[in-house]
Amino acid sequence: QSLCMKVKKKQKTSSWYRKECVKVAKKIVRIRDKNVCQKCGRNQGALHCSHVYPEGTYHSLSAEPLNMKLLCYRCHFFWWHKDILEAKDWFQKKFPDRYTILKKLSRMNIKVDWAKRLVKLKKEYDTLQD
């Protein structure tokens, strides 16, 4: 047998592309939200890109920047996840247009081509970098 064996390149899966999309979307959100907690205004410490509609339930919205907001650790875990009704009301008042769009999107059964979505998100991110 030859020592030079062909190594098969692993095919990238839809799951891999979705995760890459989420990473790029989070970078976009950090720029859009100016690295500031949207609830309390903190700009130091751990800042989290938090989903409005949960990733697990709303898979097609998982890499949608409109479905994310930047929150500090405290606001993310001790407010957003603890007081869901107040958090929903806050988001609706602070971001009424985003709330309306997300509400419509959440009701749609969207089939996402994650590879194509990744290309679009990378372009969006690149334009924000300029």
Image (tube, rainbow, N blue to C red):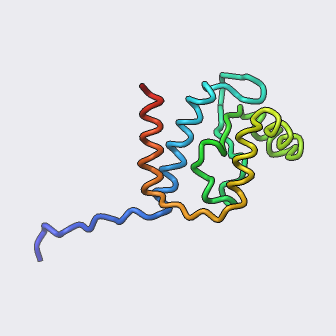
Residue at left offset 67%, top offset 59%: 58
Q: Nearer the viewer, residue 12 or 92?
A: 92
Apparent side of residue 105 relative to residue 5 in the rendered image (left or right): right
Q: Nearer the viewer, residue 10 or 115?
A: 115
Q: Is residue 72 above or below residue 59?
A: above
Q: Is residue 110 above or below residue 127?
A: below
Count of numbered badges drawn on the protein: 0
Outermost residue on the bottom side: it is 1
Residue at left offset 62%, top offset 59%: 59
- Quadrant holding the C terminus: top left
Q: Position of residue 6 (x, y in %)?
A: 19, 69
Q: Quadrant of residue 65?
A: top right
Residue at left offset 47%, top offset 44%: 121
Q: Nearer the viewer, residue 77 or 80?
A: 80
Q: Position of residue 61 (x, y in %)?
A: 63, 53
Residue at left offset 44%, top offset 28%: 129
Outermost residue on the left side: it is 2
Q: Quadrant of residue 4?
A: bottom left
Q: Position of residue 55 (x, y in %)?
A: 66, 55
Q: Nearer the viewer, residue 130 or 41?
A: 130
Q: Quadrant of residue 13?
A: bottom left
Q: Position of residue 96 (x, y in %)?
A: 77, 37
- Quadrant holding the N terminus: bottom left
